Amino acid sequence: ANAASFSISGEPSQTFNVTLPTSATMVTGGGGANRTIAVSTFTSSPAGTGTLDATGNATLSVGATRAAIPGTQIGGSYSGSFSVTVAY
């Protein structure tokens, strides 16, 4: 899987703070037994604080670690959502 990528824009050369979630859940087939995967340990680049470039733009990449997958996990396409806050 790839990290999520977000475009940030604002006043040129301003610093911004990034707040990440502590956890999220990915689900397939409506959820239930063996149909969810916990996600935690979110990381970002830049981490914590970044700076908009001279044109007022920056890219924020966000990744996370998923829980171990047991042998009983249902195969499928899993999806979920999480919130990231950028303030400057």
Image (spheres, helix red, strand yellow):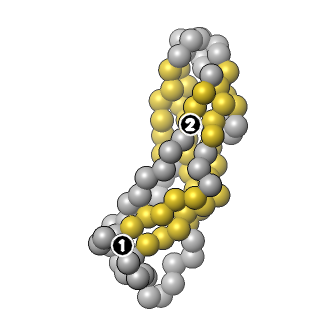
**Residue 40, position in %: x, y?**
60, 61
Q: Quadrant of residue 75?
A: bottom left
The residue drawn where x is 43% and y is 52% is 81
Which residue is identified by label 1?
31
Q: Which is more toward the observer, 51 or 35?
A: 35
Q: What amino acid type should be assigned to the residue bearing mark 1? A: Gly
Q: Quadrant of residue 77?
A: bottom left
Which residue is identified by label 2?
85
> Of helix, strand and loop, which one carries label 1?
loop
Could you tell whether 47 is left or right of 59 in the image?
right
> Of helix, strand and loop, which one carries label 2?
strand
Number of numbered markers: 2
The residue drawn where x is 56% and y is 45% is 62
Vertical placement of residue 6 versus 57, above or below: below
Q: What amino acid type should be assigned to the residue bearing mark 2? A: Thr
Q: Which is more toward the observer, 65 or 28?
A: 28
**Residue 59, position in %: x, y?**
53, 31
Mark closer to the chain start, 1 or 2: 1
Q: How many angstroms separate mark 1 from mark 2 (CA)? A: 27 Å
Q: Residues within 10 Å of mark 2 (few under 14, many from 20)?
A: few
The residue drawn where x is 56% and y is 36% is 85
Identify the mark at residue 88; answer none if there is no mark.
none
**Residue 3, position in %: x, y?**
51, 49
Quadrant position of the C terminus in the picture: top right
Vertical placement of residue 78 versus 86, above or below: below
